[in-house]
Amino acid sequence: MKKFFRPLAVPDRTSRGLLLVRLLAGVAFMIHGWAKIQAPFGWMGPDAPVPGFLQALAAISEFGGGLAWVLGLLMPLASLGIACTMAVAIYFHSMVRGDPFVGSGASYELASVYFAIALLFILSGPGRYSADHNIFR
């Protein structure tokens, strides 16, 4: 398990960049997930096409994953949860609703960006300035 969470050795300059992305995207996710975590099993409303259990997983991945990104804690697990949630959001907006990639209304642009950030953290790790680096180095 320690091997799974052990961060890769990255240069200091790269670690500072990863820290900035972690903080900005993590806080944005916490804000975005705050309303969902208040009613985790029903944030989509009573006529939701998604079961309450899956709504709760999305709420936890957004709020909890955002907090994990801010702290740099358990980054592979948090990033996997966020990537799965964003993949579902991309599918829902692009295939089910037919929303454009970029548009003035609903689109799947932001979900795609967050998906890419999650993949970045899965592949690169959190960098030196993270709880994972201090715990698992």
Image (cartoon, rainbow, N blue to C red):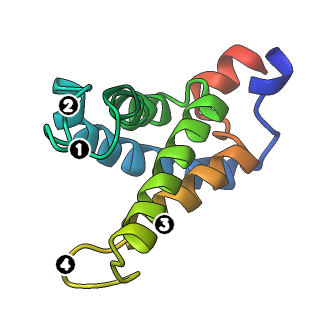
Category of crowding for the residue at label 4, using alpha-carbon neighbours closer than 10 angstroms: few (below 14), some (14–19), many (at least 20): few
Q: Residues within 10 Å of mark 3 (few under 14, many from 20)?
A: some
The Cα atoms of the two marked residues, 3 and 4, are separated by 16 Å
Badge 4 is on which residue? 105
Label drawn at residue 112: 3
Give coordinates of residue 70: x percent, y percent: 43, 35
Q: Which residue is mark 2?
A: 42
CA gap, disc 1 and disc 2 = 8 Å
Residue at the disc numbered 1? 48
Residue in front for this viewpoint, 133 or 44: 44
Residue drawn where x is 34% and y is 27% of the image: 56
Mark toward the start of the polypeptide (4 vs 2): 2
Q: Earlier in the sequence, mark 3 or mark 4?
A: 4
Q: Determine whether the residue tagged by mark 1 lies in a helix, strand or loop.
A: loop
Instruction: Out of 41 and 6, give the one closest to the viewer.
Output: 41
Left or right position of 90 against 133: left
